[in-house]
Amino acid sequence: MAQYLLRRFATITLAMWLIVTITFAIMHAIPGGPFASEKKVPDAVKRNLEARYHLNDPLYKQYVDYLKNLLRGDLGPSFKYEYRTVNSIIKESFPVSAILGSLAIAFSLLVGLLAGIISALRQNRWQDYTAMILATLSFSVPSFILSGLLMYVFAYKLQWLPPAMWGTWQQAILPTLALSALPTAFIARLTRSSMLEVLQQDYLKTARAKGLSERAIVVRHALRNAILPVVTYVGPLIATVLTGSFVVESIFAIPGLGRWFVLSVTNRDYTVILGTTVFYSAFLMAMNFLVDLAYVAIDPRIKLVDRRDV
Amino acid sequence: MLARKNILFGLLVALLMVALLSGCGAKSQEGAKSAAKEQVIRYNVGAEPKTLDPAKATGLPEGTIMMQLFEGLTRYDAKQEIKPGIAESWEISKDGLTYTFKLRDAKWSNGDPVTAKDFVYSWLRALDPKTASEYAYQLFYIKGAEEYNSGKGKKEDVALKALDDKTLQVTLKAPAPQFLGLTAFQTLYPVHQKTVEGNPNWFADPAKYVSNGPFKMVSWDHNQKIVVEKNPNYWDAGNVKLSKLEIYLIDSIDTAYNMFKTGQLDFQDDVPVQELAALKGSKELKIVPDASVYFYRFNVTRKPFNDVRVRKALAMAIDRKTLVEQVTQAGQKPAFAFVPFGFKDADGKDFRENAGDFFKEDVEQARKLLAEAGYPDGKGFPKVTIMYNTNENHQKIAQAIQQMWKKNLNIEVGLQNVEWQVKLDRETKLDYDIARAGWSPDYMDPMSFIDMFVTGGGNNQTGWSNPEYDKLVRQANSSGDQKVRMEAMHKAEKLLMDEMPVMPIYFYTNPNLIKENIKGVIIPPFGTYADFKWAYVE
């Protein structure tokens, strides 16, 4: 187990280094730069700007400097929002995205699992059809359309909820719904199909024959097996949803992390591009690792061992 | 058993409904109504400011926010006349080179007096190469300024002197009548030396923000809103009626539109194009002039645009009126010249109106020109492409022009949308055929448009060069006599339109949504979005 963890840690470190290096290379290869603008500035001004942000250093030096700072946990200053550092941007905006993301994940799990279980148990009846039609719908509507629609109906037409911004619980409702539509649908369908598969298994017949209550059969025996694919999906999902969505955050004017992934690229804000990428990757890999640990907890047949340990 | 499943499903539906409806009671109308009685305006500036340091800011949102917080030597009034600001009066020497400003008794928001030394400090700070100010060049009119900024000259040699606490003397390197107007803008605002020194991020902390304008900083909630309130230490505080101004930082225009419509904003400075038709006739829609031009660049180093007849034919073969009425829909004016309306000529009248149009739309003539250039009925015209930055409106305009050229000249052009920075890069490298562009002035003088197209100018980007044009620009820039300057610029513009390296399409307008009870807001034609000094709620 210890060796497994060690190997795992080594792979993650290597992957992180590759991600930083490739992002660094691509970022400098695309046209433009943080100080490009429609109005051309005199050369002297451009030189002063580049000197201030060390953009006039040779690329390899910029790269080594970045790695050094990264090891110290310093992601550098933003070039565009000069009063902010990448660390402060993540520190301020990640909690917002994380709260919103947690709400969305809780909603998706609750509704998605319930809908999936019911559909499986009531296969080919109206409950199943209704749930699956809803799932297909929310699966195929892009989030910018759904966000716009939710805002139009509940904020603009009915005026039940505030259209945008962040701070009160009312403001969290519409973005949570917009954000959870797709994962809810996915979880519902995933749960349904794996439940259907599990329900055919012999051991469930045994359980029934034993005279166990339907509730115990579904919860303790069927669901526990059926939930593994959902866990696999939820790991990376948590990483994606908790780090924010550009579309939902811009439409609902939420000061989260999601917008920075896209804005930093448009702005060519080099340090922010790298910083958010590093943060997201580390988070994603940590989640995948947690998923592996969760398997062990859920399914006693799975053990985390190094191949050489076997 | 069955019943229980149904209950479970019912619960699920109920849960969904609760989640959807739980906000019913949360109407915010009440708050809006009571706020209307107070002197508070909720305004959306459309973006998180990149900085609120006057020396460093370049964008319109930044300029707009700081216009409420600061005041320069001068300030524009509702008629766009330059009026005394922190300077109570000024004298300009006969040769147009020396400006002597007399300062009034003005105070910073912390009570300290605003002195001539503050201006000297602030302007030298903006020019300091270490400050790395992008807009440092706005000060390059001052003798010695460019040398200091580029590291070739000394700080002491910048011709900027505080003769005493209340007198500021500036010497320019060449006459530049536009300099006076520049003293009303952000780069030339004074900053509070004690606040700024030793803390490069002084402006990021609202509690420590010291300014000298109608309002002072209260709070700054990133990507949400900035709140400013009336500054009791402002010299003209008696004329400031607003007690508070909430500046929202919402970047999605559709979201801001919804917030305006649901009463959460009083003033939103842009309108989604798809809403314009429905808003026609609404008293809340105010369309004001914008001194900017929308145009296409031709790459004159490439065939077939190396032939002036082709450039002219293309410019004459589109229908600008249809374009602004059907596509852009915000009352834009078709452009048959390059300098927009709104600039004063030597006689005090409008520069554009005095000069009139330089060409006409004429399909017959356009066809003839194209045939003379070797493409009768569009035959043999090479496949060329219009490049524009990714944006729905630019795309619609390009599609309309593509169709007009097809119909009128029988030529095929391709369309290509590229990301903003890719467009900038390709324009600079002359790696395009036709490129969409827009230009707004840096200062209120036609020179801000005319000097773009001097040979090798950084903003030329067409490959076009004309010694006669360069000479006219030099002539205008070396004289302090408005008559001589304007005359030279009129000639230059005519030459530019005869040669047509750029094809003007329309002059911009600025559509705003303002609640009817909001009065006294000044919406300038360029530089910033709005000035709330004289604004009030009725």
Image (spheres, coloured by chain):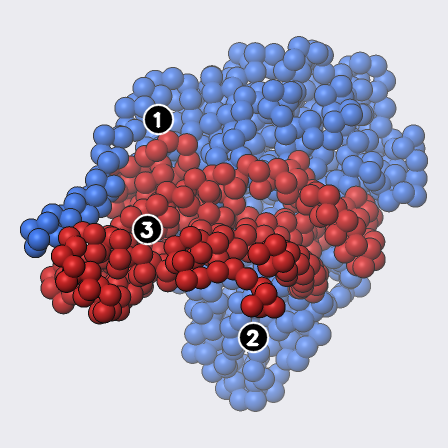
Q: What residue would you read off at disc 1? A: B517
How would you rate the neighbour count of disc 3 (Cα within 10 Å): few for under 14, some for 14-19, many for 20 or more? many
Quarter assignment of residue B301: bottom right
- What residue lies at 37% left-to-right and 62% top-to-bottom? A229
Q: What residue would you read off at disc 2? A: B385
Q: Secondary structure at mark 1?
A: loop
Q: Amino acid at mark 3?
A: Ser
Q: Amino acid at mark 1?
A: Asn
Give the camera-side residue of B142 and B209: B209
Farthest left residue? B3
- Say left or right for A209 vs A81: left
Q: In the picture, which chain is red?
A: A
Quadrant in which the N terminus of chain A appears: bottom right
How far across and how far down the image is residue B232, in percent? 56, 11
Quadrant in which the C terminus of chain A appears: bottom right
- Say left or right for A112 vs A283: left
Q: Amino acid at mark 2?
A: Thr
Q: Earlier in the sequence, mark 2 or mark 1?
A: 2
Which label is found at residue A108?
Answer: 3
Mark 2 and mark 3: span between their CA atoms?
Answer: 47 Å
How far across and how far down the image is residue B300, in percent? 68, 72
Give the camera-side residue of B337 and B330: B330
